[in-house]
Amino acid sequence: MHAFDVLGDPVRRRMLELLADGEQPAGQVAAVVHAEFGISQPAASQHLKVLRENGFARVRAEGARRLYAVDATGLREIDAWLTGFRRFWDQRLDALATELARGERAGSTSATTGSGPAADTEEET
């Protein structure tokens, strides 16, 4: 299964978001997706299995519990694919940073020279 096929499912994306906060027991992840999506515990287990088998999650046993965590292998596959497209947003982010810097310089200049928006000086009658 391709990485985008794995993350094309909103339940699996949500599970990955939960795991990004740190290692989680399978039951806790299943409870959240049950509450949000109405899926059963066996269905949640199948989604966790897909994440695990495709390099997005890893599991370790702790007694009877199964603890899941993010595995970066699948994310690296997505990151590698996106590399060819970064130029489309990197240029815009660089331009935004330039404009923000200009705004900060202009703001500090007007503060030191006393120019800038005039205060409302009309008195109430």
Image (spheres, grey):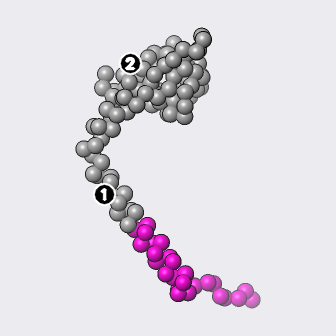
Name the residue type under label 2.
Glu
Q: Earlier in the sequence, mark 1 or mark 2?
A: 2
**Occupied quadrant, residue 53:** top left
Q: Check residue 108 for magenta coloring.
A: yes
Residue at 35 percent across and 60 percent down: it is 94
Magenta segment: 99-125
The disc label shown at residue 53, or none: 2
Residue situated in front as seen by the camera: 2 or 33: 2
Identify the secondary structure beneath mark 1: helix
Number of marks drawn: 2
Q: In this figure, which residue is indicated by the disc labeled 1? A: 91
The location of residue 18, given as percent across then percent down, is 53, 31
Residue 47 shows in this picture:
no
Would you place residue 8 above or below residue 98 in this image?
above
In the orientation shown, which residue stands out farthest toward the top? 64
**Occupied quadrant, residue 124:** bottom right
Name the residue type under label 1.
Gln
Residue at 46 percent across and 77 percent down: it is 106
The location of residue 73, given as percent across then percent down, is 37, 28
Quadrant location, the N terminus: top left
The disc label shown at residue 73, or none: none
Horizontal relation, residue 81 to residue 118: left or right? left
Residue at 36 percent across and 29 percent down: it is 74
Neighbourhood count class around disc 1 (C-alpha, 10 Å): few under 14, some 14–19, many 20 upward: few
Q: Check residue 57 for magenta coloring.
A: no
